[in-house]
Image: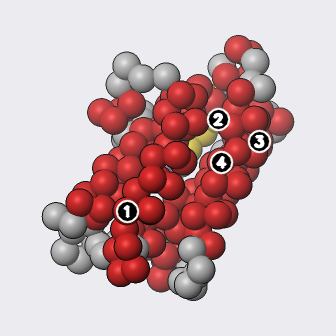
Amino acid sequence: MNPYSKWIEGKDPLAVLAATPGRIRELVSRFGPDGMNRPYAPGKWTARQVIAHLAQCEMIFGTRFRQAVTLEGYVVQPFDQDEWMAREPVAADGGELDALLAMREWNLAFWRSLSTEELGRKLTHPERGEMTVNLLLETVAGHDLNHLEQLETAAAGK
């Protein structure tokens, strides 16, 4: 099951994952001094928090993929995104974006190296059941597009 399927349907997940960082960098350049602290909707995360969340996920997703292709019967360890965000310090210098971009380049190299056999490897997500590495890749790409939409909304100031 991919909870982000509506965002990724018909798209190449690797192309999405490669393009998203540039789009995020472009949006960040439009935010202005206070824009990073603007939520995408009332009561929702700020642009800075969305980027911090994406960096947190990039760290976790990279680990999940590496575990899934090297450990037989790998079971994903879920995390509570709101608990993580509540504990995350705010980087005044935009360190969240730098962390996301660096980890994305590292993960892209790994994802691009996956063989057909590795993409078909199975893993288990406690909340989503059995899935393949390829479905996990599609999920991560859809996750990117979901949050990219939020950043676009914040950048537009709506």
Q: Nearer the viewer, residue 123 or 59?
A: 59
Element type at marker 4?
helix
The residue drawn where x is 23% and y is 60% is: 156
Q: Residues within 10 Å of mark 3 (few under 14, many from 20)?
A: some
Q: How crowded is mark 2: few (under 14 residues within 10 Å), some or many (20 or more)?
A: many
Element type at marker 3?
helix
The residue drawn where x is 49% and y is 22% is: 12
Query: Distance between the Cα atoms at labels 1 and 4?
Result: 21 Å
Q: Which of marks 2 and 1 is nearer the N terminus?
A: 1
Q: Nearer the viewer, mark 3 or mark 2?
A: 3
Query: Mark 1 belongs to which amino acid?
Result: Arg
Q: Residues within 10 Å of mark 1 (few under 14, many from 20)?
A: few
Element type at marker 2?
strand
Relative placement, left or right, of 16 versus 96 is: left
Residue 25 percent across, percent down from the top left: 50, 55
Q: Nearer the viewer, residue 6 or 107?
A: 107
Q: Nearer the viewer, mark 1 or mark 4?
A: 1
Element type at marker 1?
helix
Displayed quadrant of residue 69: top right
Query: Distance between the Cα atoms at labels 2 and 4?
Result: 22 Å
Do labels 1 and 4 touch, CB within 8 Å?
A: no
Label number found at residue 123: 2
Label number found at residue 30: 1
Residue positioned most to the right: 70
Query: Distance between the Cα atoms at labels 2 and 1?
Result: 39 Å
Instruction: Establish if 31 lies above or below 75.
Output: below
Relative placement, left or right, of 1 versus 102 is: left
Label number found at residue 51: none
Query: Mark 4 belongs to which amino acid?
Result: Arg
Q: Nearer the viewer, mark 1 or mark 3?
A: 1
Q: Name the residue under label 3.
A: 66
